[in-house]
Amino acid sequence: MAKNVQIDLTADEALVLFEWLSQFDLQAASAAERSALDGLLAALERTLVEPFRADYAELVAAARARLLVEP
């Protein structure tokens, strides 16, 4: 039986990771990697509201910028 694992991410990390996973070519990954990455993407999709906003691209850009300067 598989155990669940919780991961804490900042909102910026979650948004940037979601964008990256959305653009990632999952077909290049192995079946197991594809399953894991697809599960992570689905979890982020259930959590984030930003992808549905009209200013999504700007939100991702701002999140990326903040991640570059924050430790």
Image (cartoon, rainbow, N blue to C red):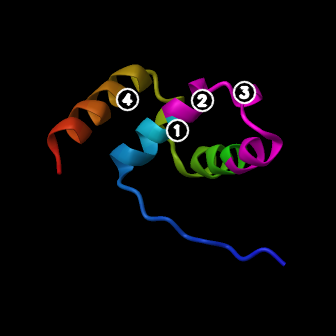
Q: Name the N-terminal-most of marks 1 and 4.
A: 1
Q: Quadrant of residue 33?
A: top right
Residue located 31% across and 25% down the image: 61
Q: Name the N-terminal-most of marks 3 and 2.
A: 2
Q: Secondary structure at mark 3?
A: helix
For disc 4, the marked residue is 60
Residue located 75% across and 41% down the image: 34
Do the CB atoms of the residues marked 1 and 4 lie less than 8 Å apart?
no
Q: Name the N-terminal-most of marks 4 and 3.
A: 3
User: How far across and down, in percent of the image, does residue 37 sit?
Assistant: 66, 45
The mark found on residue 28 in the picture is 3
Q: Quadrant of residue 62?
A: top left
Q: Nearer the viewer, mark 4 or mark 3?
A: 3
Q: Name the N-terminal-most of marks 1 and 3.
A: 1
Q: Nearer the viewer, residue 38 or 34?
A: 34
Q: Is residue 2 above or below residue 51?
A: below
Magenta region, residue range: 19-36
Q: Secondary structure at mark 1?
A: helix
CA distance separating discs 3 and 2: 14 Å
CA distance separating discs 1 and 2: 6 Å
Q: Is residue 25 left or right of residue 66?
A: right
User: How far across and down, in percent of the image, does residue 15 sit?
Assistant: 43, 40
Assess disc 2: are there few (<14), some (14-19) or many (≥20) residues with their C-alpha within 10 Å of its C-alpha.
some
Callout 4, which amino acid?
A: Val
